[in-house]
Image (spheres, grey):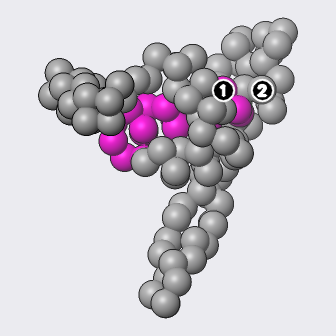
Amino acid sequence: MFRATGVILQVRHFTKMMDLQVHHITAFMNVVVSLPDDPARRPGADGANLSRRALEALASEEYRAGRLTKPELRQLLSYETLDELDAFLKAHDVFDAYSMADLESERQDLDRLGF
């Protein structure tokens, strides 16, 4: 049996307005996840923590799949700095693609700069 209540995620949608400047309109969408009674009643399954973990899981998968950019992910998770975002990505085993061509390009840049 599933509970009628569940985890509510607030997912922000980003819409650009046509203007001289780009403005972001933030609209919230609630996503309800129904959980079986047993896990929902477990100690430590408080709603706020569970909601945050569900949001982080969704956000990390959307970023990994290429459906969110780093700035969008940072805003979605309400991180103020890139260091916070990088720590989040590392903790969720999400790493940017880095090829041998990228390494060679950076090596050439460092050579050019005298390092």
103 or 28, nearer to the observer? 103
Mark 1 — residue?
53
Q: Is residue 65 magenta?
A: yes
37 sits to left or right of 41: left
Q: Is residue 81 left or right of residue 96?
A: right
Quarter of image, res 36: top right
Q: Quadrant of residue 8?
A: top right
Count neighbours of disc 2 (C-alpha within 10 A) and say few if under 14, some if 14 to 19, many if 20 or more.
Answer: few
**Dot 1: within a 10 Å radius of its alpha carbon, few (fewer than 14), some, or many (20 or more) residues?**
some
Dot 1 amino acid type: Arg
- Residue 51's x, y, as percent? 71, 33
| Residue 94 screen position, x and y as percent | 43, 23
Residue at the farthest bottom position: 19
The answer to whether residue 71 is magenta is no
Q: Is residue 41 above or below residue 112?
A: above
Query: Judging from the image, what secondary structure is the residue with disc 2 in?
Result: helix
Please provide the residue range marked out in magenta.
Answer: 51-68
Tell me what residue is drawn at x 51 percent, y 78 percent: 22
Q: In the image, what residue occupies the spot 42% across and 39% down? A: 62
- Closer to the camera in the image, 87 or 53: 87
Q: Position of residue 103 (x, y in %)?
A: 24, 24
Find the distance from the CA under tag 1 to the CA under tag 2.
6 Å
Which residue corresponds to the image point at 52% horizontal and 64% vertical from the top-left? Answer: 14
Image quadrant holding the C terminus, namely top left
The answer to whether the residue labelled 1 contacts the one labelled 2, judged by CB atoms less than 8 Å apart, is yes
Q: Secondary structure at mark 1?
A: helix
